[in-house]
Amino acid sequence: MEKDSKILILGGNGLLGSAINRELKKHNYQNILSPRSKEVNLLNKNSIDNLLKSEKPDNLFMVAGLVGGIMGNKKRQADFLYQNSIMILNLLESAKENSLGSKILYTGSSCIYPKINPQPIKEERFMKGELEETNKGYAVAKGMGIVACQLYREQYGIDANCAMPTNLYGLKDTYDLENGHMIPGLIKKFLLAKRDGTDITLWGTGNPRREALYSEDCADALIYLMKNYSSPEIVNIGTGFDYSIKEFAEILKKELKININLKWDLSKPDGTFEKRTDISRLKNIYPEFSPRSFEKGLSEIINNKDELKRILG
Ligand code: GDP
């Protein structure tokens, strides 16, 4: 990928896509396209055909998808299965027909590994066990997408590559308390409690463990992989360390200087107990990769006026 390569980001306005866009601009890439979903509907093959036929991008980040937190996933399993499957199949089929030369980087997610794994999770665990019930639709679709990239590479020579990011957070996140992810959900609940003095109720037991990767750090790794990696083997992108939900809550209390007793809603699911990624493959490819701490990422969010406006309205 050169500074004047034509780079297409599908999903370029979401949490990860917008971070890729910012990182590329920071490093002086000049020819970036990131069409909105209104302009290019990935569920419609004609729409993606028209885009690839006319633009023929050199590099393509495929980070679009229907995403959500544990409850968002659980309630709409069929939608998550359908939309995430069709989008990547349309893209690969269209690349085969219209833009064979594009290098593609597709993102799966650490939550599509089996429910139970030796920790940390190595890439070899992909498709090696039963899935977590709360996100089965998403996991089957994303897993299929990864296999599809491998098969289109093998049969048609498409340079399709896959990465497995862990739980992400960052600017332009979705702060939907019902359907969003845990980290933006916690950030919003703590900020509301600080502003309005309301109680905080978190979900489940608080014992499950999660990693937290800042979106810009994930974007940095993806750009590095786009430049330096081509292989059917997937690559985890994580921090390599995790916290329990209770520990996340303690960090938020400390960073936001708020002392409050938490309530736990045990009717909500815990989901996968732990899913810490093994990032040794990534570190072999990109030894300088060094993701920021959760405290640092959090301070960038709570000190960003625009983001605070998005969170609190
Ligand atoms: P997951 O990592 O794919 O399971 O999805 P999430 O990012 O939604 O994290 C879910 C985990 O966080 C579960 O163990 C939940 O019980 C726990 N959790 C605690 N409070 C919240 C909350 O306010 N929102 C969400 N989404 N999850 C929460």
Image (cartoon, helix red, strand yellow):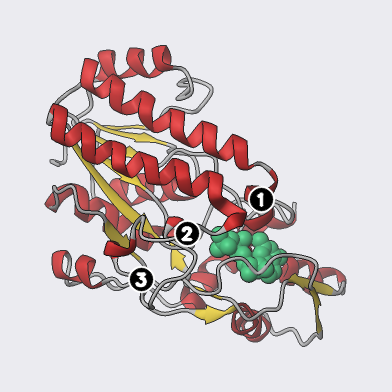
Is the CB of mark 2 within 8 Å of ligand 1? no
Mark 3, residue position: 121
Type of residue at label 3?
Ile
Q: Left or right: 277 with respect to 308? A: left
Q: Secondary structure at mark 2?
A: loop
Give residue 193's position: percent from left, percent from top: 80, 72
Type of residue at label 2?
Glu
Give residue 281's position: percent from left, percent from top: 20, 67
Decide: marks 3, 1 in contact (CB < 8 A)?
A: no
Is the CB of mark 3 within 8 Å of ligand 1? no
Mark 1, residue position: 74
- In 3D space, how far apart are the residues under numbered discs 2 and 3 (Cα atoms)? 15 Å
Give residue 108's position: percent from left, percent from top: 38, 50
Q: Left or right: 45 with respect to 134? A: left
In the rendered structure, which disc, 2 or 1, sits on the residue that comes first in sequence? 1
Q: Nearer the viewer, mark 2 or mark 3?
A: 2
> Could you tell me which residue is drawn at 62 percent across and 55 percent down?
134
| Label of residue 130 in the image | 2
Instruction: Rate crowding at label 1 as few (under 14), some (14 to 19) or many (20 or more) other CA atoms within 10 Å.
Output: some
- In 3D space, how far apart are the residues under numbered discs 3 and 1 (Cα atoms)? 23 Å
Ligand 1: which quarter? bottom right
Give residue 255's position: percent from left, percent from top: 61, 82
Q: Secondary structure at mark 3?
A: loop
| Label of residue 15 in the image | none
Q: Nearer the viewer, mark 2 or mark 1?
A: 2
